[in-house]
Amino acid sequence: MTVKIAPSILSADFSRLGEQVQEAIAAGAEYIHVDIMDGHFVPNLTIGPPIVRALKPLTQAAGVLLDTHLMIEQPERLIPDFAEAGADQITVHVETCPHLHRTIQQIKSLSVRAGVTLNPATPLETLSEILPFVDLVLIMSVNPGFGGQAYIPTMTDKIRRLRDYLNERQLARVEIEVDGGIDVENAAEVVNAGATILVSGSHIFNKYQSVLANIVALRAAASREA
Ligand code: DX5
Ligand code: ZN
């Protein structure tokens, strides 16, 4: 399976966001990853539905999926707004959802792909009852809240255990997205462990190389044998 790349706009230059997203789309990104933070669940505050709405014409014209990662408390209050703004995929943290099945059903009822996310210290076991109902699992490989952090190496084994578990339960269709600290050094390891979508922010939007060069390099690195 070829891996899909989801540039996280958290590290983009917000003064020219549309241009940066166009660069990522032109470089072949399959998703645009939008990090929604509320200053409560995570110690940072980012953006809301208006930005998703503004980006929608760009992604839609290119057939790219808008991937919204909700790092917010009580996400069920805002899920309809993100769906209405044009999110193609919504992921919620298990840590924020006491009624996770209900929340996943809510996302699916709005015809949006539904995903569930785990913080690094949250065990895979919390997913056992919800996996048949989701389209993807997002494994956080840093503690959520900020871009530019280092990949937590023990997350590779967590990804591998999840992939084995999905295969054993005839749920191989469930995508594994990995988010945090992904770069050319660890991309192959993460893909070989079973990831199908790589999120990357600071290693795509930075001052060292163009967005195009960074995406080409990441894709090449991800296809190497670890
Ligand atoms: C962190 C966010 C990530 C972040 C990744 O809370 O969920 O999507 O933007 O940034 P990098 O790739 O720099 O770790
Ligand atoms: Zn994210």
Image (spheres, grey):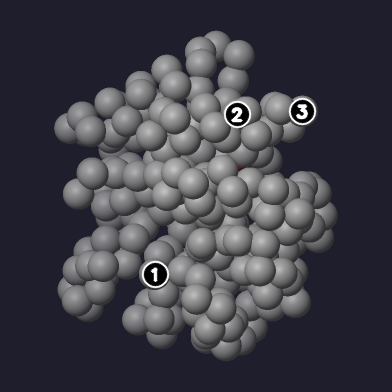
Label 3 to label 1, Cα distance in Å?
Answer: 33 Å
Instruction: Determine the secondary structure under disc 3.
Output: helix
Q: Mark 1 points at which residue?
A: 135
Amino acid type for the residue under numbered disc 2: Gln
- Measured as percent of width and height from the top left, residue 56 is found at 60, 51
Residue at 45% in and 44% down? 62
Residue at 46% in and 69% down? 113
* Mark sitting earlier along the chain (2/3): 3
The residue furthest top is: 208
Residue at 42% in and 38% down? 29
Q: Which mark is residue 20?
A: 2
Q: Name the residue under label 3.
A: 15
Tell me if mark 3 has few (under 14), some (14-19) or many (20+) residues whose alpha carbon lies within 10 angstroms of its own. Answer: few
Instruction: Determine the secondary structure under disc 2.
Output: helix
Q: In this view, does 159 lie above or below 7?
A: below
155 displayed left or right of 169: right
Q: Quadrant of residue 129?
A: bottom left
* Mark sitting earlier along the chain (1/2): 2
74 displayed left or right of 39: left
Q: In this view, does 128 lie above or below 31?
A: below
